[in-house]
Amino acid sequence: MGLRLKEFLAGCRDEAPLQLGVIPFGMLYGIGAVAAGMPVWLAQLTSMVVFAGAAQLVIVQMLAAAAGALPIGLTAALLNLRHLLYSASVAEHVRHLPRRWRVLLAYLLTDEAYAVAILRYTRPAGEAGNGVAGNEPQGAGPDLRHWYFLGCGLTLWGCWQLSTALGIAFGARIPPEWDIDFAVPLTFIALLTLLVKERAGQAAALVAALAVLALAALPFRLGLVLAIVLGLLAGAAVARESGK
Amino acid sequence: MSVSTLVLLLGAVGVLTFLFRYTMIGLVAGRTLPRWVHALCRHIAPASFAALAASELFIHGGEVVFALAAPKPWAALVAALVAWRTGNVLATIAVGMAALYLLKALL
């Protein structure tokens, strides 16, 4: 087996278990997009163009709540700002690659692909996979770890497109009185309890939730954007207080 | 929102998202992010999810509504307890939906 293919397949294999969590999200997005009145072609195209699970769910929920285009765009952009951190984190590892590789890997840089690929970069090049399967003699070969990154990214991409399509197909058949779109806020609640383990995060969540209610009267759901910004500031302030 | 506005909006979000992902890899090579960007980015997800959940549960037509007979906030509370005890996203969704159907039948 070629070394490139070996790295690529190792990336696919290590990314696979995460798809158990990704596929329900993609289906939920597809179902929600149809329920919010998005045309089917646009719902699928969004999964290709935006390719960011949390932001897509947020867009769908805000569309369903008749929010304006500007608040939706601002909220989604704010939420995706974290990718800047991933970009900074992988930059040193991919800087030597040709531009077409960097563009492709940047496009595939999502939460789940980053989480797996960055672990590969903590291990030396020329030792494919998670270090368990490699039974061939390993020399100091060329750095082919970007093929591993590509395997992670494409596995996730494929699952995301497929689960979106499944959600769209299902969503069109589910009667509205089933309230299936209620699963979206439930997802946010579940993720929230997983994310908020320390006081700064709790402060950010609490201030954002209270602020969104206080600012409910603002038009086009602009209160949502402001509430998130206030939550960020509260989180940063508490983090500074506690010296972290 | 018209379909053409929606296409523009989603296109803009897509371009911005790609730029966030590409900036440090391709545009400003060799630079590091200031500390305050890290500090703010860490809290984006909890702040967004909390604001969205609160807005979905308690805001209807631009007004804050706390109705004791509304099933969704109670179902969300049950789901939050499951999320807190199990840390399992799928279990949270399943129990939350089941609670919603049960409450809708009862209330």
Image (cartoon, rainbow, N blue to C red):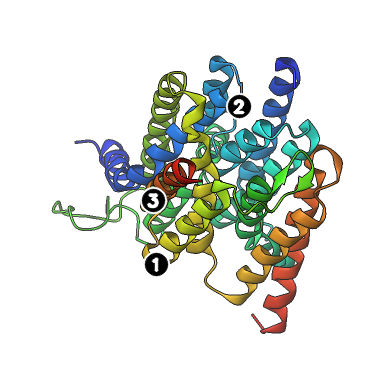
In the drawing, does residue A122 fall left or right of residue A138?
Answer: right
In percent of the image, x 54 and y 47: which residue is there?
Answer: B71
The spot of residue A136 in percent (x, y) is: 14, 51
The spot of residue A117 in percent (x, y) is: 41, 51
Furthest residue in direction left, as rendered: A135
In the drawing, does residue A178 fall left or right of residue A225?
Answer: left
Task: Name the residue beneath numbered marker 3.
Answer: B95
The residue nearer to you, when weighing B90 against A75, is B90
Q: Amino acid at mark 2?
A: Ala
Q: Amino acid at mark 1?
A: Arg
Quadrant position of the N terminus of chain B in the picture: top right
A166 shown above or below B82? above
Is disc 1 on the same chain as disc 3? yes
Task: Name the residue beneath numbered marker 2.
Answer: A36
The residue nearer to you, when weighing A191 against B21, is A191
The secondary structure type at the circle numbered 1 is helix
Task: Name the residue beneath numbered marker 1.
Answer: B85
Which label sits in the foreground, 3 or 1? 3
In percent of the image, x 27 and y 44: which residue is there?
Answer: A10
